[in-house]
Structure formats: C-alpha cells, structure tokens
Image (cartoon, rainbow, N blue to C red):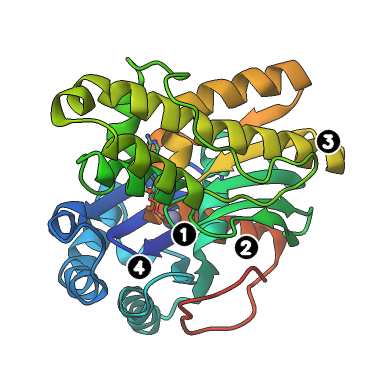
Amino acid sequence: MLLLGIETSCDETGCGVVNDRFEVLGDALYTQAETHAKFGGVVPEVAARAHLEKIRAVAESAVERAGIRLEDVDVIAHTRGPGLLGPLLVGSSFAQGLGRALGKPVMGLNHLEGHLASAYLTDPSFEPPFLALLVSGGHTELVHVGPGLEFRVLGATRDDAAGEAFDKSGKLLGLGYPAGAAVSRLAENGRRDFVDLPRALMERGNLEFSFSGLKTAMAREIARRDADALEREKADLCASLEEAIVDALLKKTLWAMRGLDETRLIVAGGVAANARLRARMAELAEREGWKLVLPERRFCGDNGVMMAAAAMKRVQLGKWPAGGGVSAGLRWE
Ligand code: KG4
Ligand code: ZN
C-alpha cells in the first residue's frame, strides 16, 4: 500500500510517499519562506501562485525519490484545511486531477491531523489513544485522540499561537520571519531568568493558552534599551521569551495528562522542533512515566509526508473522512 500526501495549506509545497509500515519512501519540499520574508508574513496570493508553479515538480520528485511511478500510488491525500484558501485550492485541485487521471481515490484531510501523524513516522507502533500538544504558527491546542481517531480539543489559545509568540517577538528583535528557529538559536547562550515575562492563565487546571501578553511585554523590554544594550542582551531576551512559552506549554500539558489519567503523549507542529521544549518535555515525561513521541525535526514543520501518514492511519482504521472540497477554517471532525 502506497500513499501520496500533498500539503499546500500555507507556505510550504510538500509531497511525500509512505507505505503501510509508515516508512518514508519519498519526501520533497519546496519552502516559500524567502519569498514571504520581505513582507514579514505570508501573502496568500503570492503563496497560491508559488504553489501552482511548484506542485507538479514537487510531486514528481517525491515519487521519483521513492523509486516508484505515480501509477503505483494507491491513495492520494491532500490538505482540506485549515489554512489559506487559495493555497489549499491548488493542492486540492492537483490531487483531484491526479486522482481522476490515475483512477485512484482522493482523500481530503485536516492539516492538524497531519501534524499529529508525524508521530507515526518516528514510532510506527504508536497508536491512539494519546494526548497531543499541537504547537504551530497558527495553532496551539491540547487534543485528545481516541482509539478510533475521535478528536477532542481540551484547550486552545485565546489569542496568539505559540509559534506566533516566537515570530512576533522575534520580529521586534529584528530576527526576520519566521523567527522561531532564530530565537531558539540565540536563546542557547542566554539567561532564561533575565527578564520576568508573563505566564498567562496559570490557575491550576486551566487548559487554555494566551500568548499575546508576551509580545507586549517584550515590546516594553525592547523600548527600554538603546541599540547597544539590545544587541548585548538579545540572547538573554530570547532565552527569557523561550522559557516563558515553554513553561506555559509544559504546565498545561501536565494538567491535561493528569486530568485524563493519560500516559501517552506526542508533541507536534512547527514549534515541536524547538530544542528547549523537546528537552524539557522529555524530562517531564521521564519523571511522570509517560510514553512520549517527539517527531523528527524535519517532520515538525509543514510537509507532505505527514499528510500521507495521516491518510495511511485512516486507511488502516477504515475511517474515510466525511466531506470533500477545501475549507479555510476546517475544524476537527
Ligand atoms: O507547523 P508550521 O510549519 O506551520 C504552521 O502550520 O503554522 O509551524 C511554523 C511555526 C512558526 O511560527 C515558526 O517560527 C515555528 O513554527 N518554529 C519554531 C522553531 N522552528 C519553527 N519555533 C520555536 N523554535 C523552533 N526551533
Ligand atoms: Zn502546520
């Protein structure tokens, strides 16, 4: 059984091929980050055009790397949403066209379900039920996944996502877009208790997140310093910012795991690539006796392989998703 996954919800054109043992046979990714960097964020129309230009070549190279032909693919999966409508339509139309041409079924999937499925690529024996901490540029959610892929959102962000908190503060520090990885790199050599930044909604058991106060607090810290001081203390500010974000993520994950009496956890999404989050979550899991799966870093950000993996899990469980087409604001089914 061979699955082709296609991801075009934001600014990465990704295609991947996996088999029924969740082995990655072919992986191809075209990232538009540089195109959007000069605008300080993703421009939807520019993204849609870039997807359109690249999608065929990316799909072909994924298949080529897998050493197969397109005709060998059994199911074609694409992202239905949530995401940017124009980019989603490019991936969906391409998948539909391919399906029709090859006479193969096409499956439209939730992008967030794709992020969760990156865990199967690291540990193919890992099965639901589990708790997922999903942290990306657009989402921060604690989701419980039932044995038959029943999704239950336990808590989400009220305002900015965790990735956004990295990106917006990083932008204020002149670190470009997206800034998460750059903040994290600088933070390695910074003092994590340098400035006291807010941790919001910390009443015991509260599973919601709020990160918008961080950006305001960072803006204040930056305004207080002249250019020299800012340059000298950039790493310290990054380290303090990273610690505030990671503290909130860990605390709420701990409360959710205890509340559910759950012992299995995955962390997924672009921010799951963060070294500090990975290290501290691994420590916590060890202390609490949890089974933790951290996806390989290359599968944390948006990619096509994770969509193929999500579709493979659905095929194996006999759970074809309801509904077709695309939707910018698609919710969990
Ligand atoms: O999942 P993703 O690629 O796209 C969305 O679906 O949003 O996540 C992108 C986000 C960006 O906000 C980026 O800054 C953040 O993930 N990110 C990181 C790191 N690598 C990427 N944040 C913190 N530390 C990192 N190492
Ligand atoms: Zn994503």
Where in the figure is residue 123, as x and y percent of width and height? 59, 34
The mark that comes first in sequence, 2 or 1, is 1
Where 87 falls versus 193 (above or below)? below
Q: What's the distance in space between the residues labelled 2 and 4, CA to CA?
A: 18 Å
Q: What's the distance in space between the residues labelled 4 and 1, CA to CA?
A: 11 Å
Which residue position is annotated with label 3?
258
Asked if the residue at tag 1 contacts the one at tag 2, i.e. Cβ–Cβ closer than 8 Å, the answer is yes
Q: Amino acid at mark 3?
A: Arg
Where 142 falls versus 198 (above or below)? below
The mark that comes first in sequence, 3 or 2, is 3
Where 94 falls versus 172 (above or below)? below
In the image, is 130 to the left or to the right of 276? right
Q: What's the distance in space between the residues labelled 2 and 1, CA to CA?
A: 10 Å
Is residue 125 visible to us here? no
Is residue 113 visible to us here? yes
Q: Amino acid at mark 2?
A: Val
- The residue tagged with tag 1: helix, strand or loop? strand
Q: Residue 258 appears in which quarter of the rendering?
A: top right
Which residue position is annotated with label 1?
3
The mark that comes first in sequence, 4 or 1, is 1
Q: Amino acid at mark 4?
A: Glu
Q: Amino acid at mark 1?
A: Leu
Q: What's the distance in space between the residues labelled 4 and 3, CA to CA?
A: 47 Å
Asked if the residue at tag 2 contacts the one at tag 3, i.e. Cβ–Cβ closer than 8 Å, the answer is no
Q: Which one is closest to the eye, mark 3 or mark 1?
A: 3
Which residue position is annotated with label 4?
71
Q: Residues within 10 Å of mark 4 (few under 14, many from 20)?
A: few
Where in the figure is residue 194, as x and y percent of width and height? 42, 19
Ligand 2 quadrant? bottom left
Q: Which one is closest to the eye, mark 4 or mark 1?
A: 1
Q: Which residue sits at x=61%, y=53%? A: 141
In the rendered image, the residue lying farthest to the front is 224
